[in-house]
Amino acid sequence: MKKKDLEMFRKMLEDQLNELLHYAGDTVNDMSERKENFPDPTDRASVETDRNFMLRIRDRESKLIKKIRKTLDRIDNGEFGICEECGEDISIERLKARPVTTQCIDCKTKAEARERALGI
């Protein structure tokens, strides 16, 4: 892969990482500052539902943060853009759509077919 492309992906991933970390920090600050007391159980339930939904989103984002960091390591190690399964290059189009991917489209398609067959 060209150095220009690697730098483009690095910047894209670093920008996304910074944005996710910013949102995570905002969530922590928001939840630690809120000390609400709701006399109405319906209001409390609504706030708890919203809070649980936000925590699920942040959990998914936490997993994405880990993937982004691993991908940045792969860029540093010269492994970025190479399929972990077959060792072939991952297409630039696929990497643009999902820069944290570790598999080419063929290997990913096969893996998803195996998962469906096994009911995973």
Image (spheres, rainbow, N blue to C red):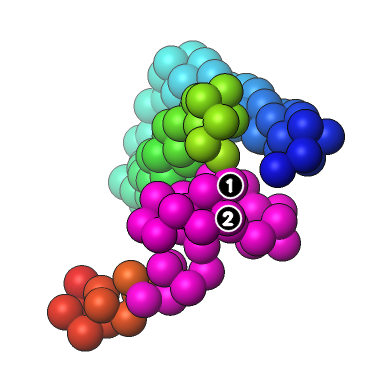
Determine the residue located farthest toward the front in the rendered image: 87
Identify the residue at horizontal 69%, vertical 30% (top origin). 10
Q: Is residue 32 left or right of residue 92?
A: left
Residue 33, compared with residue 9, is above or below; it is above
Q: What secondary structure is found at the residue carrying circle 1?
A: loop
Identify the residue at horizontal 52%, vertical 48% (top origin). 82
Q: What secondary structure is found at the residue carrying circle 2?
A: loop
Front position in the image: 72 or 24: 72
Q: Does the magenta stretch include residue 97?
A: yes
Determine the residue located farthest toward the right in the rendered image: 4
Residue 26, compared with residue 89, is above or below; it is above
Residue 113, given in percent of the width and then of the height, sits at: 32, 81
Q: Give the range drawn in magenta.
A: 81-110
Residue 97, given in percent of the width and then of the height, sits at: 67, 58
Residue 72, given in percent of the width and then of the height, sits at: 56, 28
Q: Name the residue under label 1.
A: 81
Identify the residue at horizontal 52%, vertical 69% (top origin). 105
Q: Which amino acid does label 2 sit on?
A: Asp
Q: In this view, does 12 lie to the left or right of 59?
A: right
Residue 82, compared with residue 112, is above or below; it is above
Q: Quick check: can you spot residue 100?
A: yes
Q: Earlier in the sequence, mark 1 or mark 2?
A: 1
Q: What residue type is labelled 1?
A: Gly
- Identify the image quadrant of the C terminus: bottom left
Mark 1 and mark 2 residues within 8 Å of each other at the beta carbon: yes
Front position in the image: 78 or 96: 78
Residue 102, given in percent of the width and then of the height, sits at: 46, 50
Q: Mark 2 points at which residue?
A: 89
Residue 110, compared with residue 100, is above or below; it is below
Identify the residue at horizontal 25%, vertical 74% (top origin). 115
Q: In this view, does 79 lie to the left or right of 40?
A: right
